[in-house]
Amino acid sequence: MRILFFATFFEYKGAETYYTLEVDSLIKNYPEVEFLVYTVNRDKNRLKRYSENVLWVERKNLKNTQSIFLFLKDMVKIFTKFKPDIVHSVYVIESIITGILAKIFRVPSIFHSRGMDFNYYPFISLKSNFLARVACKLNNIILTVSKSMKKDSLRLNVPPNKVIHIYDGVDFSKFNPIEKKFDSMERTFQILHIGRFSHEKRHDLIIEACKKLREDNINFHLTFIGIGELKNQITTLIKNYDLEDYIELTGWVDHEKLPSYILKMDLFILPSITEGLPISVVETMSMGLCVVLTNVGGMPELAQQIGGILIEKNNVEQLYNAIIYYLKNPQDLEQGGKINREFIINNFNWDLHSKKLYTIYLKLITKN
């Protein structure tokens, strides 16, 4: 079985780790599967042999005639020499491009939707709405990372039997908790946020809540892990509120090192205005943390009993109250973390993910 995997990003041990882990789990469980990974968001052209089953073709952005010509030449060679049985693409634009090519070469294709270009922008932009509909029309199957995104597809008039949701997995060998006790109210309460510095993550709301925590003499410390275009604004707001001693910006942290940060934390917060199903939440829950999340996208699917509190978006008061609740109820913090860990183990398993994905591949090949 040969798969052409087309994406803007494919960073082994980098930012987009779920792509790597998805491919790795399929190869581990089904060694007859071969992947040709093709990306078009690089600073240079090169080939990389990741493993016996994975060849990675890296190409520059399609910004000029030369790069477009090389891309078309590559595609003809891939479809005539590699001869993929399935085309699996991520994101809307990529899925339109490969959807057209798959139709030309009569190969079944999958559009794997993961976030804002499918569950947010299409409902605030006519252009994005049109592009999402085209991507859905061109591809045989639409995969979503959450149940809520499957519901979003219905708003785009996608036939329900064409859409399948599959949860991502977690590397449990790395994101493995230790026994923690949350019974000491004297120590500093450690809060964690992981996410790129962009408007939809609402870092400003988190900082507003921290301002109120400090004014109420709460002993806390917040860690921001991430990078992005809003770093300067975030840094300025922290300084304006005199919160430099309470909030730390770590910058970029390699995925391999995230568990060591999470182990030190008491609570994870993510008050985004839009999400698909964020892997940062899944990984922190896997390590036994309770979470405070906004009631958007797939995040309600993650809030488990006392392990998670859902708040409305743009509501600093609810965010503050949720933090205070967990700070004052260490028994719920501890029990909720255990509930979260069990939930993630049972539902976000890469072996289970690969089994479902392999079954989808087989059905598409058989129908074709």
Image (cartoon, grey):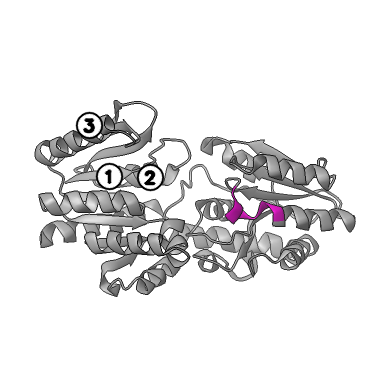
Q: Earlier in the sequence, mark 3 or mark 1?
A: 1
**Which is closer to the viewer, label 3 or label 2?**
3
Answer few, some or many: residues within 10 Å of disc 2's Cα (few below 14, many 20 plus, some between 14 and 19): some
Q: Is residue 200 left or right of residue 203?
A: left
- What kind of element bears circle 1? strand
**Which is closer to the viewer, label 3 or label 1?**
3
Q: Which residue is pictured at 52% across the width and 36% down the height?
A: 256
Check disc 1 and report the residue beneath it: 5
Write down the region rendered in magenta. Answer: 198-204
Residue 207 painted magenta: no
Q: Which residue is pictured at 77% across the width and 56% down the height?
A: 208
If the image is split into quadrants, where does the C terminus sit?
A: bottom left
Given residues 87 and 62, the one toward you in this image is 62
Given residues 289 and 89, the one toward you in this image is 89
Amino acid type, residue under disc 2 in the picture: Tyr
**Magenta stretch prevailing secondary structure:** helix
Check disc 2 and report the residue beneath it: 19
Q: Earlier in the sequence, mark 3 or mark 2?
A: 2
